[in-house]
Amino acid sequence: MLEKEKEALAKRIAGEITLSSDPGKTMRKWREIFGISQTELSSELGVSSSVISDYEGGRRKSPGASTIRKFVEALLDIDEKRGGNVIRAFSRTIGSDLPTNAILDIREFAFPVTIKDLLEAIKGEVTANEDLLSRKIYGYTVIDSIQAILEMSSEEFLKLYGWTTERALIFTKVTTGRSPMIAIRVQGLKPAVVVLHGVKKLDELAVKIAERERVPLLLSHAKDENELILSLRMLVEKSEKS
C-alpha cells in the first residue's frame, strides 16, 4: 500500500534522526507520532525495552545507519499492521499544492511542545478542556478563516493537518468561532487543539463542539496576525533548542 509515500516518509524520518543534534529525542518524537509504545517497538525489533529507552534518553551513543533503518522500518511495519493511518496522512501532503491563500503559516516543531507552551506563546485563554493542556503537539497551521470558507474544498481542508493531526489548527479573522468548529466536526478528523484569533463574541456552540470532541479550544489575544505568527515561530525556535 502507498509504497512511494512509505519510501518518502522513511527517508524523511531517517534524515531527521541522522541530522538531529539529539537523535534519541528525535527517535522518541517519531515513535510518539506513530502512537507506538516502547514495549511494542522493542518487541517488533526483537530487543528489550531498555534499549529503546537508552537511545531516547541519550544513554547510548548515536544510532548507526543500520539501527536507524531498522527503527524506521519497524515504525512503518507497525503502522501498516494497524491500517496505515500515519502513512496515509503523510501521503496527503505529497504531490499536491496546499491552498496557499488560506494557509498563512504551517510549521512542524523540531521536538514536541505542550498545549500549555502554545497557550503562553500566543497570549491565550482556555475556553474548553483545560484538563488537556499537557497534551503534546507536533506542529501548527495558521488559517485565514474567511479564505478557507470561500475557497477550500473538503479535500483541501484535510491538508491543513500536514502529516499528523496532533497539531494546532489556528484560525484568524474569526468572529464567533462557530464555522471553524463546525468544519472540524463535519470533517471527522480532530486536531490536538484549536486556536481562534480575532473573536468578538465566542459562540456557545463552538465551545459545546470542542467539549464534545474533547479538543481544547483557546482564544489568542495577540494584537494581530503578525504578532501571532511571530510568536509561533519563536516557539518553533525554542523547540529546536530544547
Image (cartoon, rainbow, N blue to C red):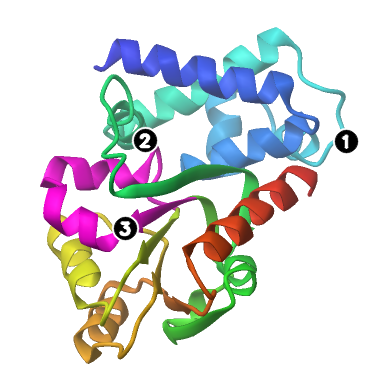
Q: Element under label 1?
A: loop
Q: Quadrant of residue 211?
A: bottom left
Part of the protein shown in magenta: 140-166
Residue located beneath label 3 in the image: 144
Q: Element under label 3?
A: strand
Q: Earlier in the sequence, mark 2 or mark 3?
A: 2
Q: Nearer the viewer, mark 1 or mark 2?
A: 2
Tell me whether circle 1 and circle 2 mark residues in contact (CB < 8 Å). no
Q: Residues within 10 Å of mark 1 (few under 14, many from 20)?
A: few
In the image, 179: left or right of 3?
left
In the image, 188: left or right of 113?
left
Seen in the picture, residue 215 relative to 88 is either above or below; the reply is: below
Q: CA distance from mark 1 to mark 2?
A: 28 Å
In the image, 167: left or right of 211?
right
Residue at 71%, 19% in the rendered image: 18
Q: Which mark is residue 59?
A: 1
Residue at 22%, 54% in the rendered image: 147
| Image location of residue 186, percent across then percent down | 12, 62
Residue located beneath label 2 in the image: 86
